[in-house]
Image (spheres, grey):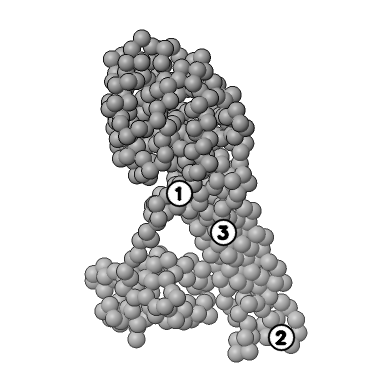
């Protein structure tokens, strides 16, 4: 199966069903009495985490998801049917972002955990809901509320306790294969893992943990070179980093320079990966120059930092590494995978307490355009095909302060004001 760990998709919740204008036929009741029913609720887009998936591959080929709309209201005060919710299953460890704002909408870290990402619109009210003693036979109804819509980025970040890092071909996959039942690809030529591999390791005293063999790093990975961020995002959740170094110095490499280069990339990535505790594993100790290289490496490293020499291929020294990892995990807390979000604020031309603001744009030649989530929603839900509907729309605009704001902005009697596709002439 192809491993896909980042996708861009579009989701749109269902629109609420429209309310209707209808009257029952009954003697001695004005116009038969209002009997228009409400529209049904639109379906929501819900993401659910599951352990049965390990990749976002399905989203690679299907990029657009729309939930069902609510049904239209009917006569005799009958309610329209609610639209069915759409449930999208993703692997455990998936983080969902709003692509336009960068805001995290959900971080699904448990099996069967759910998050409503795009909420379905509520159904519009039928005219039966607007009857009053002063207006017993209203011709007002509402259109359904639009459903929420988002451009999303879904990222899979592996839920591993331990991440193996190091240059390509240092023996990370070999180490994973001998301490777990994972079977990553291993080759005897210059070769790098291109997808993460997971396995459960266990020390001889019974303590177990999840270990991930992550794609090999290269210099510049923190800026996106090579596999770059495709690699680094998977280490964000790891509590312990195991730094595997080829102490044999194959291909003329210097083990200490490799160590510094990898730590440089970890330090430059945005989630402060160097704050996580590290265990240094000196692999390939059966190579001719390995002992001399290890001695020089320890002198350069200094500060009495422990280094665990191993020959992963024959499992020599591996038990000590597993004990050290288990001990470190026992005293290491989880790290937050996200920095604190700073909400972006917008300065509106006019804003009342407890109301979503709006902006007024002077288009010139007596033309004005109003934008804002609240006013646009009022227009979308307004029934503008009757005098009652127009009157109610005008009252709502006055209630949210649009009339006063237009005057302050300089709108004159006779100017044209537009909201979405709806235009009206402003008058005093």
425 is higher (above) or lower (below) than 91: below
Q: Residue furthest right?
A: 27
Q: Nearer the viewer, residue 140 or 297?
A: 297
Report the Cα–Cα distance between label 2 and label 1. Answer: 64 Å
Q: Which mark is residue 336?
A: 1
Report the Cα–Cα distance between label 3 and label 2. Answer: 36 Å
Q: Which residue is mark 3?
A: 120
- Along the polypeptide, which appears first: circle 2 or circle 1? 2
Q: Quadrant of the N terminus?
A: top right
Task: Residue 176: give x, y in percent of width and height.
Answer: 51, 24
- Along the polypeptide, which appears first: circle 3 or circle 2? 2
Residue at coordinates 60% horizontally, 90% vertically from top-left?
134
Q: For residue 38, say whether it is visible.
A: yes
58 is higher (above) or lower (below) than 318: below
Q: Depth-wise, is mark 2 or mark 1 nearer the camera?
A: 1
Q: Depth-wise, is mark 1 or mark 3 nearer the camera?
A: 1
Q: Residues within 10 Å of mark 2 (few under 14, many from 20)?
A: few
- Along the polypeptide, which appears first: circle 1 or circle 3? 3
Q: Depth-wise, is mark 3 or mark 2 nearer the camera?
A: 3
Q: Residues within 10 Å of mark 1 (few under 14, many from 20)?
A: few
Q: For residue 64, say whether it is visible.
A: no
Q: How many marks?
A: 3
Task: Residue 406: give x, y in percent of width and height.
Answer: 32, 78
152 is higher (above) or lower (below) than 428: above
């Amino acid at each position: 199966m192809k491993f896909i760990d980042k996708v861009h998709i579009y989701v749109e919740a269902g629109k609420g069903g429209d309310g209707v204008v209808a009257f029952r036929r009954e003697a001695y009741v004005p116009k038969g009495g209002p009997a228009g029913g409400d529209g049904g609720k639109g379906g929501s887009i819900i993401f659910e985490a599951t352990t049965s998936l390990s990749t976002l591959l399905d989203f690679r080929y299907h990029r657009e998801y729309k939930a069902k709309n609510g049904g239209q209201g009917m006569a005799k005060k009958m309610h329209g049917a609610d639209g069915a919710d759409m449930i999208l299953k993703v692997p455990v460890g998936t983080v969902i972002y709003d692509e336009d704002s960068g805001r995290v909408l959900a971080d699904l870290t448990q099996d069967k955990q759910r998050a409503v990402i795009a909420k379905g619109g509520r159904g519009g009210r039928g005219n039966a809901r607007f009857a009053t003693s002063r207006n017993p036979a209203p011709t007002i109804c509402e259109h359904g509320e639009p459903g929420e819509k988002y451009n999303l980025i879904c990222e899979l970040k592996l839920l591993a306790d331990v991440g193996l890092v190091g240059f390509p071909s240092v023996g990370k996959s070999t180490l994973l294969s001998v301490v777990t039942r994972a079977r990553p690809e291993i080759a005897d030529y210059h070769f790098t893992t291109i997808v993460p591999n997971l396995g459960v390791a266990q020390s001889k005293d019974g303590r177990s943990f999840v270990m991930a063999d992550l794609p090999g790093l290269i210099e510049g990975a923190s800026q996106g070179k090579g596999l770059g961020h495709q690699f680094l995002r998977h280490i964000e959740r790891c509590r312990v980093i195991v730094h595997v170094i080829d102490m044999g110095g194959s291909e003329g490499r210097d083990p200490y320079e490799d160590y510094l280069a990898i730590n440089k990339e970890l330090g430059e990535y945005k989630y402060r990966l160097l704050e996580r505790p590290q265990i240094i594993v000196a692999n390939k100790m059966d190579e001719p120059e390995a002992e001399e290289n290890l001695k020089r490496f320890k002198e350069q490293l200094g500060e009495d930092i422990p280094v665990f020499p191993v020959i992963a291929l024959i499992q020599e020294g591996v038990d000590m590494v597993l004990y050290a990892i288990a001990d470190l995990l026992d005293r290491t807390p989880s790290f937050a995978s996200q920095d604190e979000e700073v909400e972006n604020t917008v300065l509106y031309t006019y804003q009342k307490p407890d109301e979503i603001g709006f902006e007024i744009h002077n288009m010139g030649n007596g033309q004005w355009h109003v934008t804002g989530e609240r006013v646009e929603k009022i227009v979308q839900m307004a029934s503008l095909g009757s005098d009652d509907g127009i009157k109610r729309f005008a009252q709502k605009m006055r209630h949210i302060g649009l009339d006063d704001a237009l005057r302050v902005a300089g709108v004159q009697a006779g100017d044209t004001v537009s909201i979405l596709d709806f235009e009206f002439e402003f008058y005093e």
